[in-house]
Image (spheres, rainbow, N blue to C red):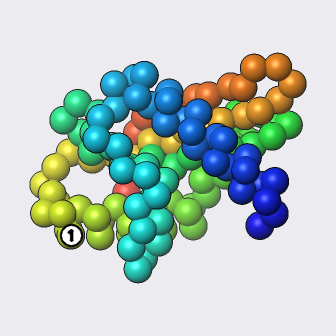
Amino acid sequence: MTRERLDLGDWGEALALKTLKGLGYKKIIRNYRCPLGEMDVIAKDGDTLAFVEIKTRKGRSLGYAKEAVNDRKKHQLSKVALAYMKHHGCTEAKARFDVVAVCLNQGEPQVEVIKNAFDLAY
């Protein structure tokens, strides 16, 4: 991955985190890693555990960023979420998968938070 893409991803993640905090998400964990993979953000939204994937794109539409979470990625994120819940003893907690799409076109960046974007895919 090029330095430009890494920088864009970091920028998008920072903007997404600011947006999530503004929406009331709490106790945010960034870049959770386990042997099964990585989750961009794990947070509490009220009494629900939110597993969040952030997709940042430049020069494309928000729809393009949202479509980047394909079936393979959903399966991977599901495995990581289940491993997190098992490891932290919260398998009975309410949980969901959210996607934050960040697009940088000319002008102001666009951010869309899609709550409950997909179901467990494992």
Camera-side residue: 14 or 57?
A: 14
**Residue drawn where x is 72% and y is 34% of the image:** 103
Q: Position of residue 10 (x, y in %)?
A: 64, 48
**Residue drawn where x is 47% and y is 72% of the image:** 37
Q: Position of residue 30 (x, y in %)?
A: 43, 52
Camera-side residue: 8 or 78?
A: 8
Report the quarter where the N terminus lies. bottom right
Q: Examine the rendered structure and indicate whether residue 18 appears above or below residue 3.
A: above
Whether residue 17 is visible here, answered yes or no, is yes
In the picture provided, is 100 more to the left or to the right than 121? right
In the picture provided, is 13 more to the left or to the right than 105? left
Q: Position of residue 24 (x, y in %)?
A: 34, 25
Secondary structure under tag 1 reads helix
Q: Position of residue 96 (x, y in %)?
A: 34, 45
Q: Examine the rendered structure and indicate whether residue 53 appears above or below residue 61.
A: below
In the picture provided, is 82 more to the left or to the right than 57? left
Quadrant of residue 47 within the rendered picture: top left
Residue position for label 1: 87
